[in-house]
Image (tube, grey):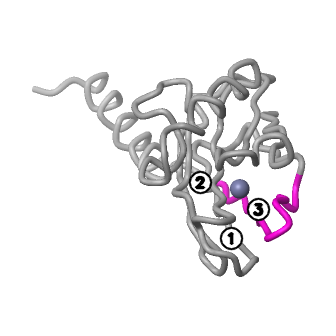
Amino acid sequence: MISVRALAIMAVILLAMPLTAFAKTCELSITGNDQMQYNKSELVVGAECDKVKLTLEHVGQLAVEQMGHNWALTKTAVAKPVAQAGSGAGLAKDYLPEGDDRVIAATDMIGGGETTSVTFDVSSLENGGDYTYFCSFPGHYSIMKGKLVVK
Ligand code: ZN
């Protein structure tokens, strides 16, 4: 005989499954242009988001070799050293240090007219943590950066 208690536990498990199967993905978007600028200096992730899908659109016309843009996310404290390390990595590596776990998320490097996106877990971010996103193309870090706020 299956006890009432066991049936109750099974019911709870079955009820809980759809909640985990439909994790909430929040969408963020940002653009980069031929003037080496993002259109946003801050992005906000709500606490209700399980995942974030960040879409980057390059609204300029210059090629990736001249005016490439990506969107890379790190803790603010390590953003500059990661960008510096990335400068020497080359376009084939999207100007990011390979296998560097300081990079929380990053899109591909794209040129004018292109769009790319990256999806990452909000669970990898601390609520109230200090995060910076930036373009790792050589020389772009000083201008192309902003804060990612989790709240
Ligand atoms: Zn750039």
Left or right placement of residue 98 versus residue 27 in this view: left
Looking at the rendering, the stretch of residues picked out in magenta corresponds to: 26-40
Q: Decide which of 16, 111 is in the foreground and name it.
A: 111
* Nearer the camera: disc 2 or disc 1: 1
Marks 3/2 in contact by CB < 8 Å: the verdict is no
x and y percent of residue 127 in the render?
Answer: 74, 24
Label ID, residue 30: 3
- For disc 1, the marked residue is 57
Residue 121 falls inside the magenta stretch: no
Earlier sequence position, callout 1 versus callout 3: 3
Q: Residue at x 59, y 51 (%)?
A: 24
Q: Amino acid at mark 3?
A: Ile
Q: Decide which of 148, 87 is in the foreground and name it.
A: 87
| Disc 1 to disc 3, C-alpha distance | 7 Å
Earlier sequence position, callout 2 versus callout 1: 2
Query: How many residues crowd around disc 1 within 10 Å: few (fewer than 14), some, or many (20 or more)?
Result: many
Query: Compared with residue 129, is residue 41 higher up or lower down, i.e. above or below?
Result: below
Left or right placement of residue 130 versus residue 112 in this view: right
- For disc 2, the marked residue is 25
Query: Compared with residue 13, is residue 33 higher up or lower down, i.e. above or below?
Result: below
Earlier sequence position, callout 3 versus callout 2: 2
Q: Residue at x 65, y 38 (%)?
A: 73
In what element is the residue under mark 2?
strand
